[in-house]
Amino acid sequence: MARSETLPVLLKQLRLSTMAQLWEPFLTRAAEGRWDPAQYLAALCEQELNERYSRRIARFTKESRLPLGKTLATFDFSETPEIRPERVAALAQNSDWVKRAENLLFFGPSGVGKTHLAAAIAHGLIEQSIRVRHFTTTALVQEMQQARADLQLERCLAKLDKYAVLVLDDLGYVKKSEAETHVLFELIAHRYETGSLIITSNQSFGEWDKIFTDPSMTVAAIDRVVHHATIIEIEADSYRKRQALAHNCKSGLNCIVRKQGEQETK
Ligand code: ADP
Ligand code: MG
């Protein structure tokens, strides 16, 4: 017959730290609520799982290096009427596309919310226990170039495999040089059909020949990226600019606020 005094040690050995903390206080609750033994055990297991989930999400959020606060809740969809909120919410809440290693691309000029939306979707995926890592593309490309110089590129790419999603922010800013674009192409080829990419870029495909050094590489890169991909183009004016203009309006300065395709309003 097991002895209850051994319970703290047993729970510790089983690495059930929340149950180890709660089994005693829950005895009182169980007595008060007249829980049967199975209910008591279920309540403890539930707490253990909840706590593990919270810790995992906190860990994944920290390692993702995503900008904090850029969530769907803080995104004002009325600024971007061409984007359907349900479409974006579905990408954040249903991770099937990640399981199929599909890609997601945001194109549009600077300041329209590409990074914000990419981060918001990525935060949603993390909540489903999906590992994500955000990079400024130029920084990642530099890291990979260094790895290549050290004959460690394969290892560097393999290390990124633990993330189901890589956010390549501002891909359009990669310098058109053989060394930079070659590693970027290697990354795209490596992730093809094995892991998702969320790419933001102010240059849509027509301009990718400004990124890659030779046309066949441009075609091959685009081919791999779009084969299984969702593409969201944002055509609004810069949110930052609009906010600044609106602010100036409020402070009584003369200004013109205009949305793409709208009449100018004073
Ligand atoms: P981009 O990546 O397209 O250059 P960002 O996502 O960095 O643009 O957006 C610039 C700033 O404006 C960020 O602080 C972002 O949170 C904010 N922003 C952009 N669009 C919206 C929006 N529709 N609602 C709320 N904030 C927005
Ligand atoms: Mg951006």
Image (tube, rainbow, N blue to C red):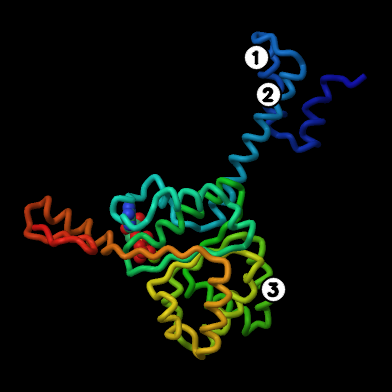
**Label 2 beta carbon within 8 A of ligand 1:** no
Local SS, label 3: helix
Judging depth in this view, the residue of 194 and 116 nearest the camera is 194
Q: How far apart are marks 2 and 3 (CA)?
A: 44 Å
Residue type at the position of mark 3: Arg
Q: Can residue 145 be seen in this view?
A: no
Mark 2 or mark 3: whose residue is earlier in sequence = 2
Cβ atoms at labels 1 and 3 below 8 Å apart = no
Q: Which residue is drawn at 83% across and 25% down?
A: 6
Residue type at the position of mark 2: Ala
Circle 2 or circle 3, nearest the eye: 2
* Residue named by callout 3: 155
Measured as percent of width and height from the top left, residue 26 is found at 67, 19
Measured as percent of width and height from the top left, residue 64 is found at 54, 57
Measured as percent of width and height from the top left, residue 240 is found at 26, 60
* Residue named by callout 1: 29
Circle 2 or circle 1, nearest the eye: 2
Mark 1 or mark 3: whose residue is earlier in sequence = 1
Judging depth in this view, the residue of 73 and 11 nearest the camera is 73
Q: Is residue 176 placed above or below 42 in the rendered structure? A: below
* Residue named by callout 2: 43
Judging depth in this view, the residue of 30 and 149 nearest the camera is 30
Q: Residue furthest right?
A: 1
